[in-house]
Amino acid sequence: MAESSKTATLTIDGQSYELPVHSPSAGPDVIDIRKLYAQAGVFTYDPGFTSTASCDSTITFIDGDKGELLHRGYPIDQLAAKSHYLEVCYLLLYGSLPSAAELEHFENTITRHTMIHEQMHNFFRGFRRDAHPMAIMVGAVGAMAAFYHDSTDISSPREREIASHRLIAKVPTIAAMAYKYSIGQPFVYPRNDLDYAANFLHMCFAVPAEEYNVDPILARAMDRIFTLHADHEQNASTSTVRLASSSGANPFACIAAGIACLWGPAHGGANQACLEMLKEIGTPDRIPEFIARAKDKNDPFRLMGFGHRVYKNFDPRATVMKQSADEVLDLLGVENNPILATAKELEKAALADDYFAEKKLFPNVDFYSGVILEAMGFPTSMFTPIFALSRTVGWISQWKEQLGDPQMKIGRPRQLYLGETVRDYVDIEKR
């Protein structure tokens, strides 16, 4: 990090302290408080770390007011429209778009790492049949450290590289196996003649009894879901991966920690919550009732899949996802699926309502991705595992970046202690 030419002055009890101010290539300035405790004997207080930069990064930038999401400087809408997931993976991992030869080599490497260790099949069978796929994901990805000893040394650039490739390649296989296990069907091995998204769909929906051909429209929609969820800056799960990494944990443990964090309904469960809301609405004729409820301040009901915590005007990923949703629904139809019919009518109604326009409650990426996954035939229990496999490359990129940062320290947040001060122990017979 370059020396800062700007400073901020903090005054406490008449004593002033000069704090460096760093200017990023994009986004607001950052006040450097690393020496504040040593100089002034105070901490800052920031629950949720929503006003605190925990690291510097060159991977992803979000401007919520502009509705901008950049990966290594490239807008997400351009990447989703013109690129594909594995090319975006290369971009996130290495910092630049690959040449044709580099991309071919990278795709071949990932494709030939998609099989998992055969003994891991026995590991899966230790779970109950009704285990949630995310529970299996957390356990299986963490267990990779027990099967791939030759890529757990984080001090070795070569082993970090191998672990990165293995995770990107094998997490879709693990996710598909978790799905197959949950529905009692046999595992389907990956196929090297299929692309990344088509291979995942094949592992999820093929059965040994008959041939299954992946429709290219569905494969493209799946690839866009992967691409649009690949990374999203310093969110809760990414911060979890970085925190775990700061202790020197192996890469598989770090990614398993990220998956566990993503499992929380406030983070990775938004598209599932959206589908559950659509099921609650039931049929298109009930939409006016629920829109009225959403406008009622005294009603706890909220439209899930509309608006976004970070994006204040529009979600740049939603425009691309809507195109895929339209293509998938045109292909598969909505006539026999009241959830999808309700989703299409709710989208129209909300976009035409001045109340939602004024509040900037636009359909977001979770609304459309949930609709697509429902149309494809995935149960809602698989929505977050698909999110996890999409985000794996983002977690790995952040993990690799942190390991190469000379400023890295083990994470150790402070606290505002409000408990009891020193008390003498009282013998039990005197209490």
Image (spheres, rainbow, N blue to C red):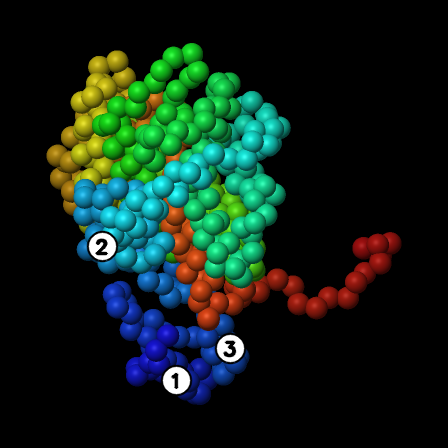
Which residue bears the numbered disc 3? 37
Q: Amino acid at mark 2?
A: Tyr
Q: Position of residue 258 (x, y in %)?
A: 47, 47
Q: Secondary structure at mark 1?
A: strand
Frontmost residue, 303 versus 34: 34
* Label 3, label 2: how far apart the Cα atoms are: 38 Å
- Cβ atoms under marks 2 and 1 closer than 8 Å: no
Q: Which badge, 2 or 1, is on the more N-terminal residue?
A: 1
Rendered residue at 30%/50% (across/down)? 102
Quadrant in the rendering for residue 204: top left
Considering the image in quadrants, where does the C terminus appear?
bottom right
Q: Is residue 150 left or right of residue 105?
A: right
Which residue bears the numbered disc 2? 74
Residue 18, labelled with which disc? Answer: 1
Rendered residue at 47%/34% (across/down)? 115
Could you tell me if residue 305 is visible in this image? no
Q: Position of residue 225 (x, y in %)?
A: 30, 37
Q: Which badge, 1 or 3, is on the more N-terminal residue?
A: 1
Frontmost residue, 241 versus 91: 91
* Label 1, label 3: how far apart the Cα atoms are: 13 Å
Q: Position of residue 96 (x, y in %)?
A: 28, 57
Q: Nearer the viewer, mark 3 or mark 2?
A: 2
Q: Amino acid at mark 3?
A: Tyr
